[in-house]
Image (tube, rainbow, N blue to C red):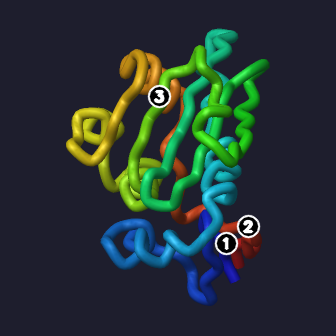
Amino acid sequence: MFFLPFMEVQQPPCRCLLSGRVTVLSFQARPTERFLEAMATNLDVENLKNENQCINLVLSDTQENFSLWVENSIMQFKRHDDSKDLASDCPTLTVTKPLYLKMITGQIKGVKVLLSNESKVKGNPLEIGKFFAMFKRPDSTFPIVTRPND
């Protein structure tokens, strides 16, 4: 059994599992917190320049509000019940959950998300771009359990 971000499969994974509409649709039912946890594991700490950054993420279709921040080379997040509780000094990205999932799985580039009619940015869009640039693209074929070579 292999573990891909957000799903388990019985067969060895292939690169095709994270591409296509079916995958995004199957991911939508998963709690957003699991995606944020997976995102935190892909923070590119080797290339961080001791930067502390933050953004707010609002998922308009699921009415979810999150503050995300990187401090001391660790990404953390907090869910808020109301968008009024979001950090006022951080830029806010408002997108649908499917668009967010496409962005973090590499199906769409972050620049296209920021320029999309489906997204709304409050604050400096460059700061949002810098925040997401701190993360490596996830390896969709990483097995948790490996077998020794025979």
Residue 77 rendering spot, x and y as whole percentages: 71, 39
Residue placed most toward the observer, 43 or 131: 131
**Do tag 1 and tag 2 residues touch (Cβ < 8 Å)?**
yes
Give the distance between the C-alpha atoms of the residues marked 2 and 3, in whole angstroms. Answer: 25 Å
**Hey, which quadrant is residue 84 in on the image?**
top right
- Badge 1 local density, few (<14 within 10 Å), some, or many (20+)? some
* Image quarter of residue 23: bottom left
User: Cα distance, mark 3 to mark 1?
Assistant: 25 Å
**x, y percentage for residue 110?**
35, 38
User: SS class of the residue under badge 3?
Assistant: loop
State the residue position of label 3: 133
Residue type beneath disc 1: Phe
Dot 1 falls on a residue whose secondary structure is strand
Q: Which residue is mark 2?
A: 144
Relative to 92, say whether 125 is above or below.
Answer: above
What's the amino acid at mark 3?
A: Ala
The reply to whether dot 3 and dot 1 touch (C-beta < 8 Å) is no
Mark 2 residue type: Ile
Badge 2 density bin: few <14, some 14–19, many ≥20, Cα 10 Å = few
Looking at this view, is 127 or 94 the one in front?
94
How packed mark 3 is, by other alpha carbons closer than 10 Å (few <14, some 14-19, many 20 or more), is some
What is the spatial separation of the Cα atoms under label 1 and label 2, in whole angstroms? 6 Å
- Which residue is painted at 45% across and 25% down in the image? 128
**Is 150 placed above or below 82 here?**
below
Residue 95 to residue 126: above or below: below
Q: Which residue is mark 1?
A: 3
In primary-sequence order, the first of circles 1 and 2 is: 1
Which structural element holds mark 2?
Answer: loop
Q: Earlier in the sequence, mark 3 or mark 1?
A: 1
Sequence order check, earlier mark of 2 and 3: 3
Q: Position of residue 106 (x, y in %)?
A: 39, 51
Q: Nearer the viewer, residue 67 or 84?
A: 84
